[in-house]
Amino acid sequence: MRTPPDRRTVALTAVLGGLLLGIVDFVWIRFLPYPVGNLGNSSAVWAVAAFGFGFWVRTGRVRAATGAAAGLVVAVPGYYLAAALIQDDDWSVLWAPTSLVWMCFGVLAGVVFGVGGIWAHRRGWRQVVGTALPGAVLFAEALLDARRVAHPGYGTEPLWDALLKVTLGVLVVLVVGRAARPRLLALAAAMPLALAGFTAFLLAGFG
């Protein structure tokens, strides 16, 4: 079994990883074609990154939650820093109220999905829920995309976003799950979790 990283490694990885996430996310949107490039606009992808951090930490809920939350908070100015350097966006966006709101969402997502990454290594219901979480958040956002299909402002383009996220959601559960039974249970659990996540997205104004 791999030795869990120490606190210093966790902290350094959270900060540098978060900064890299924000920069790569902007570059991804800017230079990759649709619909793959549109994944950079996905809040679910950032949540999956927080899950990946917790999965890497492996043990220690507080450490995983704190590190994942810190990473997502750092990713926000990282994104706007890249925007300012690459396409001359206004530097003031780094400390604008909207940036602070995204940081607050980052704290919440970091705690939930960072702990989810730890749970994926456990046994019983925690393993099922932990393994299901990254797929569930992608499915939830796919439901948001599906709501926009045929909307006059979107046309059929959101359908491709939804299909891509559903595919990624299934893949991430299959990769994280360590055997056939946990994978199947996690995929089943991801459905009600996705509905809960869809509702949370709507309440937060993402609809």
Image (spheres, rainbow, N blue to C red):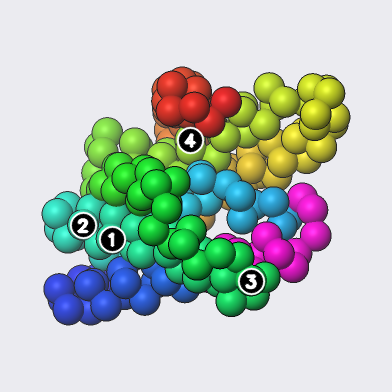
Disc 2 from disc 4: Cα separation? 22 Å
Q: Is residue 79 left or right of residue 148?
A: left
Image quadrant of residue 193? top left
144 or 19: nearer the viewer: 19
Do the residues bearing badges 1 and 2 touch, measured as CB atoms within 8 Å? yes
For residue 22, side relative to residue 52 (left or right): right
Between label 2 and label 4, give the one nearer the viewer: 2
Residue under label 1: 70
Q: Whole-percent x and y of residue 204?
A: 43, 28
Please name the residue that numbered disc 2 is placed on: 66
Q: Which one is in front in this view, the residue at disc 4 or the one at disc 3?
A: 3
Asked if residue 58 is positioned above or below residue 17 in the image, the reply reads above
- What segment carries the magenta color? 22-35
Q: Residue at x 61, y 27 (%)?
A: 143
Alpha-carbon span between mark 4 and mark 3: 36 Å
Specify the amino acid type for callout 4. Ala
Q: In the image, what residue occupies the spot 49% across and 27% down?
A: 205
Q: Nearer the viewer, residue 99 or 182?
A: 99
| C-alpha separation, residue under disc 1 versus residue under disc 4 | 22 Å
Residue carrying label 3:
88
Q: Secondary structure at mark 4?
A: helix
| Residue 144 to residue 37: above or below | above
Q: CA distance from mark 2 to mark 3?
A: 32 Å
C-alpha separation, residue under disc 1 versus residue under disc 3: 26 Å
Percent of width and height locating residue 4: 20, 71
Mark 2 closeness class: few <14, some 14–19, many ≥20 residues within 10 Å:
some
Residue placed under numbered mark 4 in the picture? 136
Q: Are marks 2 and 4 in contact (CB under 8 Å)?
A: no
Q: Which quadrant does the C terminus fall into?
A: top right
